[in-house]
Amino acid sequence: MKKILIIEDESAIRRVLKRIIEEQDKNFQVFEAENGEEGLEIIKKQDFDLVLCDIKMPKKDGIEVLEETKNIKPEIPFVMISGHGDLETAVESMRKGAFDYIPKPPDLNRLLTSLRNALEYKELVVENKQLKKKVSKKFQMIGASNNMEQIKTLIDKVAPTDARVLITGQNGTGKELVAHWIHQKSNRHRAPMVEVNCAAIPSELIESVLFGHVKGSFTGAYKDKKGKFEQANGGTLFLDEIGDMSLSAQAKVLRALQESRISRVGSDKDIKVNVRVIAATNKNLKKEITDGNFREDLYHRLAVILIEVPSLNERREDVPELIKHFAVSIAEEQGVPVKNFSDAAIELLKKYDWTGNIRELRNVVERLIILGGKEVAEADVKMFASK
């Protein structure tokens, strides 16, 4: 049932609106309030899918009800109605967050259309919030070892700044998670975080991917295209596996960091960009510099803050918590009950040599959930997770 609250001081209008809405759809359950003060109290006590609110009312007018509701339950859409309104009133209510404004006497077709659109909007808002929660959950940093606590403390200090960060560590340690945490805790979190895996892009295409290109600049460039720097404007650009970037692309990245400007491939026009760059690598960049594979000046531009993510073997005390986390997330993904791991099974897994780090541990947990017993026992680990 969709719960709709009508806040209207004229009882005759309330009754007519209630009857029309309930007759229109049997899934609509309509509640009434005779003034703004009563309506606000009802909103505080119950959840509604939509509020149809008069503007001119005693005790508390509709604009006040709208403003106070947006502070406590911002996801509830408001459709405002008024017989005293004019264009200025409509603009004011929309500016305060109303979904729509309908003058009295309301055109019934327009009213019902507005209500349905507002209800669809509410569903989209709720769905979007759930999606954001899932995204945040995907990038959780699990573990309370000293190593992880130090990284979390460092992230809290670094995130609010625009300082560039270089994240190092073995494959599978969670460098991407660190980058996402920095972005989510930063002042740029409402803007996009754009990711580029430098190792997965052919060297001849990396410049086009990063900086974009203009039509006709090379074979296959059929139209102008924005690069990742432009896409991340105002937000964060995450350059993963930057140690695999070509020297020519490194030179252009260095210029972008120095001047906050880029130019698309095939163009001499400068484009100003405001991007925070976070980079990550599993390589020893100082050795790469010595070998002539990485620019030293770019390294110093990127490594304002260095974060080294420890291997799983360096934080074995986090293994039990990681196992429980993966057991829950895998069960949710596959729609199956959560399996427990016996203490003996967990202790055995803690002793393994995790050369593939957290990524390998997750794969092993998934294998044990699929192949193990109702409770994953030590024998299951020995049989299905042997190293």
Image: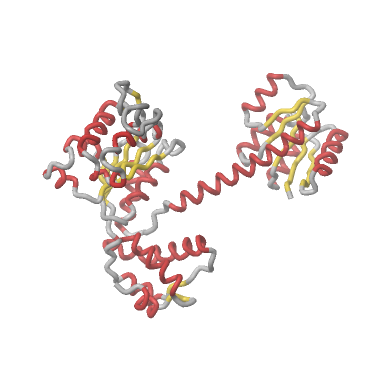
Q: Position of residue 284 (x, y in %)?
A: 19, 49
Q: Return the residue found at the far front.
A: 219
Q: Position of residue 360 (x, y in %)?
A: 34, 63
Query: Which quarter shows the C terminus?
Result: bottom left
Whether 370 is drawn above or below 239: the answer is below
Q: Residue at x 29, y 70 (%)?
A: 352
Q: Decide if residue 376 is on the left or right side of residue 126.
A: left
- Please identify the quarter of the rendering in which residue 35 is found: top right
Q: Residue at x 45, y 70 (%)?
A: 369
- Please identify the quarter of the rendering in which residue 8 is found: top right
Q: Return the residue found at the far left.
A: 290
Q: Nearer the viewer, residue 148 or 40?
A: 148
Q: Nearer the viewer, residue 381 or 50?
A: 381
Q: Residue at x 47, y 49 (%)?
A: 135
Q: Decide if residue 258 is on the left or right side of residue 47.
A: left
Q: Position of residue 342 (x, y in %)?
A: 42, 75
What is the count of numbered marks?
0
- Please identify the quarter of the rendering in which residue 310 is found: bottom left
Q: Position of residue 160 (x, y in %)?
A: 37, 38
Whether 384 is drawn above or below 257: the answer is below
Identify the image's colour scheme: rainbow, by chain, secondary structure or one colour: secondary structure
Q: Return the residue found at the far bottom.
A: 379
